[in-house]
Image: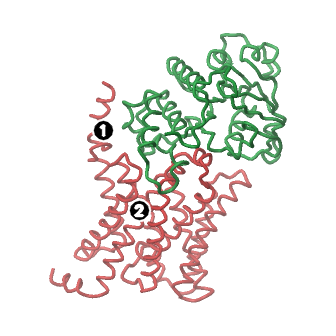
Chain colours: A green, B red
Amino acid sequence: MVTEHDHICWGGGIHHHGGHALSVSGLYVRYRDVEALQDICFSTHCGHTVALMGPNGAGKSTLIHAMAGLIRPQAGSMQWNGQDLRQTRHEIAFVPQRSTVNWQFPITVRHLVEMGRYPNLGLWKKASEHDHHIVSKALETLKLTDLQHRRISELSGGQQQRAFLARALAQEAHILLLDEPFTGLDVPGMESLGKQLRELAAEGRLIIASHHNLNNAADLFDQTLLLNKTSIAFGPTRDVLTGENIFRAFGFHHTPGIQA
Amino acid sequence: MNEFLQFLAEPIAQRSLWACGVIGFSNGFVSALVVLRKSSLQIGTISCALLPGIALAILLFGLAQLSILAGAVIAGLLVGLGSLFLSRTSRIDHDAALSILHATAFAVGYIILIRLGLQQKVDDWLFGNIMSMGNTDLWISYVVSAIAILSITALNRPLLIYLFDPRAAATMGIPTRLFSYGIFTLIILVLVSSLQAVGAFLTLGLLVAPAATMYLLTDKASALFWGGGLIGGLGSIAAFFLSYPLGWHLGATIIVVMGSLFLLAYVFSPSHGLLFRHKLQNRKNKA
């Protein structure tokens, strides 16, 4: 059984035909007197893993929040497959930055993932066989089945990130927006999350994440939007992260191997 | 003992006992919101800010129950929202703004009440006096309890998502701003309705301790609500039976019972208690 929301391009990959396109143009966001974003433009489609990169205060989180519908841009457009992104909310799942989450909240991993079914279930509808199946599958995909009855405070950093990803899968979202998912993870955790994100994208989802480490961006994301209030460069990560572009965004020359 | 049984036969005793149970249950139920939102201190300061509302209402409209309660609600809202406004429009952080506003409001209320010659009443509002609850008071607390329990139960699903992860809740179409104001209003209503029972000072204990105790006993967020309600309700009833023979003040006894239950859970909780946490930690380290 497939629900009406489940139109992820299963098995699409990067080059599939009819990939759903996300295009952002002229995006402008201001907080009181401070311009956070101006004239952000880029377009991509599902199958990609996209990094949003730039110095602190460049507006990476703001852009994520704007796409997630958490803040309202003053100008510009965000189109998902020709429709206003704000009209296609059920297509989007948001994964918060780990440090902003209350990990002492008394819920288990499975309950956290079940929260992702809320948009489909609403206030009172009982979870069906189908809902349980989706939750179990999301847990399995993220290798959390054995941990599903653990309290979320008992998870490691990488497991916590995966638990939130599982919730996004349970939402059957087409676009996954992640705020700094790699921050605070150890190297194995980083590698396994990177692999996981690539697999989720290959299945036909669009993954967009803010990221700050210039050294591993090319290994983790196939596309990058370099920004500093405004978009500086967009395209395949290796083409975007050139010395010249990095200088334009960060104002310093990047030596590979040295942490930005 | 005979004397106590005689006392129990009185309608006023039965009414107080009933009030203890209902107010204890609804406060315990709502305390889950306070604990999950981590806003205990904020609620503590707001509860004390109810006093000037009461004082002003008496000054303007005399000693009518409904106007007193309305005054208390308005004062609570003013101090709560006013402190938010102060912190957003100046360098002062929210905690500081709340502390200043609630202390000032409290002082103003105290001056007015003393000037009105209501010294005797002040004690009741600060520490509660269930025996003095009139029919209107009882009805108000029943209605508020019903509203609180029904709305929290009906909205439990989005409420938990909101409390855990407000941003994701917003992306799922949950009206987070409405929830935030709604929760605040609900807590103030419950505070006010329990004012007569445990008073502005002590009400904090009843609005935090029950769910905090459950928090040490369970890993299920929804259990915090019903468990908190049961602890609040049964604990208050137990306090009623303790206070008479011991000759203790009832409102204070309720809070002492809540505090004791919390300490018991802190030490003896099988999952999170002091005694067993060691073992759990060892198991986790081995795993």
Determine whether, in the image, residue A196 is placed left or right of residue B261: right
Query: Which residue ends up furthest to the top in the rendered image?
Result: A256
Nearest to the observer: residue B231 or residue B115: B231
Residue B259 point in image, percent of width and height: 34, 59
Q: Which residue is mark 2?
A: B29
Q: Quadrant of the N terminus of chain B?
A: bottom left
Of mark 1 and mark 2, the one earlier in the sequence is 2
For marks 1 and 2, give the CA distance: 27 Å
Name which residue type carries label 1: Arg
Residue A141 point in image, percent of width and height: 47, 28
Q: Secondary structure at mark 2?
A: helix
Q: Which residue is mark 1?
A: B277
- Mark 2 belongs to which subunit? B
Q: Residue at x 58, y 58 (%)?
A: B179
Task: Tell me: residue A58, above or below residue B173.
Answer: above
Task: Tell me: residue A54, above or below residue A116.
Answer: above
Q: Secondary structure at mark 1?
A: helix
Nearest to the observer: residue A71 or residue B14: A71
Q: Nearer the viewer, mark 1 or mark 2?
A: 2
Q: Residue at x 43, y 27 (%)?
A: A143
Q: Residue at x 61, y 70 (%)?
A: B105
Please say if the residues under marks 1 and 2 sit with CB atoms less than 8 Å apart: no
Residue A2 point in image, percent of width and height: 52, 39
Determine whether, in the image, residue A138 is placed left or right of residue A228: left
